[in-house]
Amino acid sequence: MRLKDKVAVVTGAAQGIGQGTAMRFAREGAHVAVCDINAEGVKKVSQDIIALGRKSLWFEVDVSNTAQVNAMVQKTAEAFGRIDILVNNAGGGFNLPNKLEEITDEIWDRVVDTNLKGTFICSRAVAPYMKQQKSGRIINLSSKAGRYGGELTGIQYSSAKAGVMGLTRQLAKDLGPFGITANAIAPGLALSSPRVEKLWMERKTEAERQAVIQAIPLRRLSTVEEQASVILFLASDDASYVSGVTIDVNGGWLVS
Ligand SMILES: NC(=O)c1ccc[n+]([C@@H]2O[C@H](COP(=O)([O-])OP(=O)(O)OC[C@H]3O[C@@H](n4cnc5c(N)ncnc54)[C@H](O)[C@@H]3O)[C@@H](O)[C@H]2O)c1
């Protein structure tokens, strides 16, 4: 087991890549606190983790809300005694308009607050615990959109995910002296949940979907497990000397 008795917090874990990561961590021996704005969904994931014989807590938390995040982190540390790993997964484009002229201030704020500010707020909340332990792993979810622009999302999402890469580099620089690493992954496209599948079908014609797949050297979209595997690598001892990087997990699509 690669995470035996580690304590992890995974945000946005009710479905998709967050759920896949939380379950993968639990199978690798970790105790996992999970949060989401979808309380029913995240409660079920927490029950599934406990059914595997691990400890788990679930929280209804909006990652852009400092008070909620701080309370979650404090309760997790009190219950489990430490925090080894934070996965800042909560995010997405939220099926919102993508055309520049249609992006209202509210749309910009919702997407940037969840994807970028939420990553900052959660990282800030766990940092004191990790510093005290002199160890910790922070793994952020950026996106191919942050490097090259998105397929199903707009400028608000690309900007937030580019910001996540910069935030990751600065976290690595600031927290490295305390034995803490910070890294990110930049997924290509994974039909991770019915929500993302619906967007893929509604926002692309069949011809456009085929063109996307043909542009990916591996000629297919990603699975949730393929994203969770790289997050697991970054959380494991195998990545002890990796910090500040964003790993593309995109099947060779637009390699930088
Ligand atoms: N699926 C992809 O193709 C893809 C590609 C690149 C990056 N990503 C990123 O990976 C992460 C996971 O994506 P996914 O495809 O699994 O999405 P998803 O929509 O399936 O899951 C996201 C989860 O985050 C939760 N969430 C949303 N806002 C939240 C908030 N403010 N506070 C707490 N939880 C919140 C949602 O309720 C949901 O359960 C996101 O950051 C996304 O931007 C996904």
Image: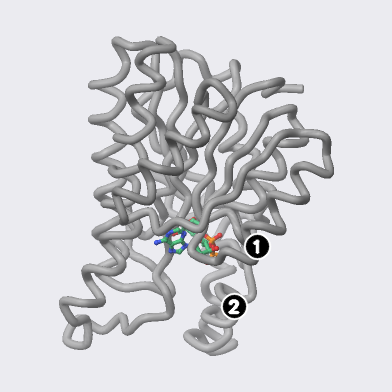
Asked if residue 176 lies left or right of residue 186, the reply is left
**Mark 1 Cα-neighbour bin, 10 Å: few <14, some 14–19, many ≥20:** some
Along the viewing direction, whichever of 204 and 252 lies nearer the viewer: 204
Q: Position of residue 227 (x, y in %)?
A: 60, 47
**Mark 2 Cα-neighbour bin, 10 Å: few <14, some 14–19, many ≥20:** few
Secondary structure under tag 2 reads: helix
According to the image, label 2 marks what residue? 210
Examine the image and state in which quarter residue 97 appears: bottom left
According to the image, label 1 marks what residue? 220
Q: Which residue is at 55% across, 27% downward?
A: 235
Secondary structure under tag 1 reads: loop
Residue 201, compared with residue 152, is above or below; it is below
How many numbered callouts? Answer: 2
Q: Which residue is at 29% across, 10% downward?
A: 177
Quadrant of the snapshot with the C terminus: top left
Q: Which residue is at 23% across, 30% downward?
A: 170
Q: Position of residue 88 (x, y in %)?
A: 44, 45
Q: Which residue is at 22% across, 71% downward?
A: 108
Residue type for callout 2: Gln
Residue type for callout 1: Arg
Q: Which mark is residue 11?
A: none
